[in-house]
Image (cartoon, rainbow, N blue to C red):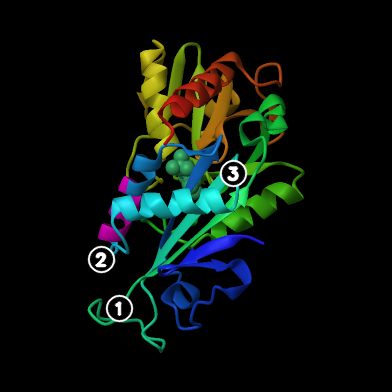
Amino acid sequence: MRTVYLNGEYLPETEARVSIFDRAFLMADGVYEVTSVLGGKLIDFEGHLKRLERSLNELDMQKPAAFDDLLEIHRELVRVNEIGDGLVYLQVTRGSDGDRDFVFPDPATTAPTLVLFTQSKPGLANSPQAEKGLKIISIDDVRWGRRDIKTVQLLYPSMGKMMAKKAGCDDAWMIEDGHVTEGTSNNAYIVRGNRIITRELSNDILHGITRAAVLRFAREAQMEVEERPFSIEEAKGADEAFVTSASAFVMPVVEIDGEGLGDGTPGPVAKRLREIYLEESLKKAI
Ligand code: PMP
């Protein structure tokens, strides 16, 4: 049985309890982060913590613990749960004031809820999916307008994954005003020659921590990076496509809406970026 963390305590997963009045349960009033673990070490931890702070600030939520304490909790959970490869999930909610009310509770009297748990994923970096590539479909993006905040409102992304599954595919890219915003749980890219194209940062997409690292590595490897919106038609005509996220790293896309890209196998740019990302991130893992 896993040991999880809840508001200052390490507990067996079956004993961790949160109020039915917790605002994340009633109103999706919470934010989260997912940090991957490779060889027992945390990948891009600082980036995830910085984004967490940003999400909390944007929603006027309290910081539940200091950076060093959060790092210590991550490490302790990885240790006690013997995680070699896997994920640490962290969630902060606005807490519970013992009733249901749209108005935010007073932070002086209502403490945030802090939950962390691990997921063991042996061989996370050697996923067979990376060899095969993803088949994706395109769907409308009907999410709210603050996708830059990593909230737990994941119903539509979850529905998107189900639409993909129903279509015999792996994931979905979302489209707004004729352009791809991002994947249901990842940032989206296309490749033309030596150029990587991905949508620029704004409130329309999550500012991926993996995205930031991958674009930096791409530039260092003399690839050209163009941050601009692209349409699904442009994506279908691209040489390659891929997605990035903390749990999938760099994952090639080989098919969009039933149309194969290139020769239908993962392209060289996505493969190379995956290797560089894994190698460089492992060097800096803590
Ligand atoms: N976009 C969305 C909508 C996501 O859910 C995620 C994964 N949390 C990402 C992008 C990728 O972000 P990151 O690289 O920080 O995991």
Q: Residues within 10 Å of mark 1 (few under 14, many from 20)?
A: some
Please tell me the numbered disc located at residue 286. Answer: none
At 38% from the left edge and 45% from the top edge, which residue is drawn? 48
Residue at mark 2: 60
If you read the primary sequence from the N terminus, does the residue marked by circle 1 or circle 2 appear first?
2
Q: Magenta segment, principal secondary structure?
A: helix
Using residue 78 as the reference point, say whether residue 100 is left or right of it: left
Instruction: Write the start and end of the magenta stretch as one range.
Output: 50-58
Q: Report if the CB atoms under discs 1 and 3 are less than 8 Å apart.
A: no
User: What amino acid is at disc 3?
Assistant: Gly
Residue at mark 3: 86
User: What amino acid is at disc 1?
Assistant: Phe
Residue 75 sits above or below residue 110 on the image = above
Residue at mark 1: 104
At 30% from the left edge and 78% from the top edge, which residue is drawn? 104
Q: Secondary structure at mark 1?
A: loop
At 41% from the left edge and 12% from the top edge, which residue is drawn? 221
If you read the primary sequence from the N terminus, does the residue marked by circle 2 or circle 3 appear first?
2
- Residue 20 vs residue 6, the one in the foreground: 6
Q: Quadrant of the N terminus?
A: bottom right
User: What amino acid is at disc 2?
Assistant: Asp
Q: Report if the CB atoms under discs 1 and 2 are less than 8 Å apart.
A: yes
Question: Where residue 169 appears, x then y in whole percent?
Answer: 72, 41
Distance CA(mark 1)–CA(mark 3) = 34 Å
Question: Where residue 282 appears, x then y in whole percent?
Answer: 48, 28
